[in-house]
Image: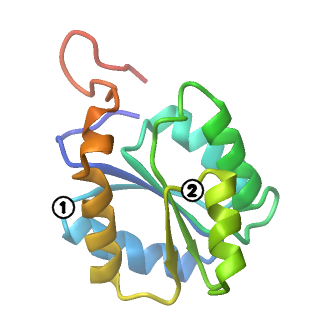
Amino acid sequence: MSRNSDRPRVLLVDDYPDAREMYTEYLEFSGFDVVEAGNGMEALQRAVDSTPDIILMDLSLPVMDGWEATRRLKADKCTAAIPVVALTGHALADISEGAKRAGCDAFVTKPCLPEDLVREIRRILDSPQSSSTKKVPRSGKYARRS
C-alpha cells in the first residue's frame, strides 16, 4: 500500500462498519490516513501491508479477537514497535490490565468522542518513546514498495 503524504497512518480495527466509518471520517478530517480491518486476522495482514504508525484495536472481534491479534503483533519483530491502543466497550479495571498484559500501549473506552481519541493518538505518537522507534520510510530510496 502506497501513501501520497506524510500524514500519520492509523490502522483502525473494529467489526462494526458504522463505527469504522465514523472514526475513519473524523481521523481523516483530523489529518490521518486510515486503513481499516474488521477482525483480528485482517488486522495482522493490514499491519504488515500498510506499516501503520499506530493501531486502534477493538478487543471483541470475530475470527480472531483483539487480545490475540495484539499478542501476535507484539511478538512479530516487524510490528512489535507499533503502538496499539485498545478501543473497547469494556470499562472494567481488569479489562484494562488484561489489555496491557496482551501488549496494548493504551486503553480507550467506547463510546468515546472522536476528538478524545485523536488527542490520545497524538499523545502517543508525540511521546519520546514513540518518536524513538524506527519508522519505515514511506518515500525516497528506502521506501517500502507494495
Q: Which colour scheme is used?
A: rainbow
Secondary element type, mark 1: loop
* Residue that numbered label 2 is attached to: 104
If the image is split into quadrants, where does the N terminus sit? top left
Q: Is residue 23 above or below residue 142?
A: below
Q: Disc 2 on helix, strand or loop?
A: loop
40 vs 64, left or right, is left
Q: Residue furthest right?
A: 63
**Where residue 127 is drawn, which disc sits there?**
none
Residue for point 53% across, 41% down: 47
Pointer 1: what residue?
31
Q: x and y percent of residue 89 in the render?
A: 62, 85
Question: Residue 106 versus residue 82: which sits nearer the camera?
Answer: 106
36 with respect to 24 (left or right):
right
Compared with residue 34, is residue 133 higher up or lower down, i.e. above or below?
above
Is there CB contact under 8 Å for labels 1 and 2? Answer: no
Residue under the image location 18 percent in, 16 percent down: 140
Instruction: Report crowding for label 1: few under 14, some 14 to 19, many 20 or more residues within 10 A (C-alpha).
Output: few
User: Whole-percent x and y of residue 100?
Assistant: 61, 59
Query: Residue 17 falls in which quadrant of the image?
Result: bottom right
Quadrant of the image for the C terminus?
top left
Amino acid bearing label 1: Gly
Position of residue 42 in the picture relative to residue 78 (left or right): right
Q: Answer few, some or many: residues within 10 Å of disc 2's Cα (few below 14, many 20 plus, some between 14 and 19).
A: many
- Residue sitting at 45 percent across and 75 percent down? 21
Identify which residue, 107 or 43, lies in the foreground: 107
Q: What residue type is labelled 2?
A: Cys
Q: Residue at x 32, y 63 (%)?
A: 121
Foreground tag (1 vs 2): 2
Estimate the x, y position of residue 86 in percent, counting from the top left.
56, 66
